[in-house]
Image: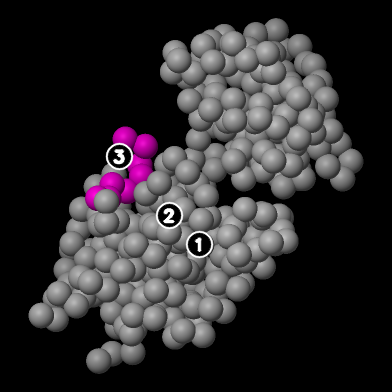
Amino acid sequence: MSENHFDIIVAGAGPAGLTAAIYAARGGVRCAVAGGVAPGGQLLETTEIENFPGFPEPTTGPDLMMRMIKQARRLGAQVLQEQLSACDLSARPFTLTVGAKKLTCDSLIIATGARARWLGLESETKYRNKGVSGCATCDGFFYKGKTIAVVGGGDSAAEDALFLTKFAEKVHLVHRRDQLRAAHRLQEKIRANPKVEIVYDHVPEEFLGGDRLETLRLKNVRTGEKKDLAVSGAFIAIGHDPETAVFGDALKKDAEGYLVTDARCATSVEGVYAAGDVMDPHYRQAIVAAGTGCMAAMEALKYLQEKKG
């Protein structure tokens, strides 16, 4: 059999993809991971993790992912530091272009994740993970008793603002329009919470501070007037985009572009499974991604066994 053929290929090397690779390799099949130039996924940008089971002391995202990569390789998975650029699911075996190589596989696990939408400000990038975050459930704990801001006006922003009131002393919910887009019930909860102040008709113009964020400068979209909010943190909640472009229209997606799967992580194409943020628009947690990676790999192994008869 060709050295470029694998029983299972995993697309993506975050917690979901690497967990899938660990389980696939332990299942005794030939497995490769298309991990991109820097395998590790979004956790490579996370400076501190203290809610991943098995780590009594906080660890960093890069450290956790390097441990997963080493574990996957030790068990026999090939973790390739090359990008998946094309995928043909119309014939079997499936054909993937990874770097300069054409690889084939009998089963594919998609764990390409989702990227947070950012405002695109230079200062936003400067303070990312230094006060600016795209994940309230990941980082909210670090803002106990602080004043923070949430940027956005939809369900995600409203949910994040409410969640953050568990920790923060004050939450400014900044929205560019004169009314929120969140569900009516969420809006009622927001208005009833004394910790939340809605700042309508404003957009962030600049993030300011020293080593960490200290001030969020806002601009009134109607008058152009600027004002500063003293904040220790700012959470950007304007949505996520699942990384599915390389698969085109070959797989069923929901209205937001996330891959549709059944309870066993199976997609609309037989033999193709999905795990992690690419199919999960709700939790966006490393432990949940790892869990679905395990599920996808176990289902893929079962699929291969059934095909062998």
Residue under circle 2? 276
Which of marks 3 and 1 precedes in the sequence? 1
Q: How is the image coloured?
A: one colour
Q: Tell me which corner region of the image, top left, top right, bottom left or bottom right, holds residue 282.
A: top left
Residues at marks 2 and 1 touching, judged by CB atoms closer than 8 Å: yes
Residue under circle 1? 15
Q: Nearer the viewer, residue 189 or 197?
A: 189
- Where, quadrant-wise, is the C terminus in this rendering? bottom left
Residue under circle 3? 254
Please tell me how crowded label 1 is: few (under 14), some (14-19), or many (20+) other residues with Cα within 10 Å.
Answer: many
Q: Nearer the viewer, residue 141 or 35?
A: 141
Q: Amino acid at mark 2?
A: Gly
Residue 102 position in % (x across, y down): 33, 77
SS for callout 3: loop
C-alpha separation, residue under disc 2 versus residue under disc 1:
8 Å
Figure label count: 3
Q: Residue at x 78, y 16 (%)?
A: 226
Q: Tell me which corner region of the image, top left, top right, bottom left or bottom right, holds residue 107.
A: bottom left
- Range of the magenta residues? 255-262
Residue 162 position in % (x across, y down): 59, 25
Q: Amino acid at mark 3?
A: Asp
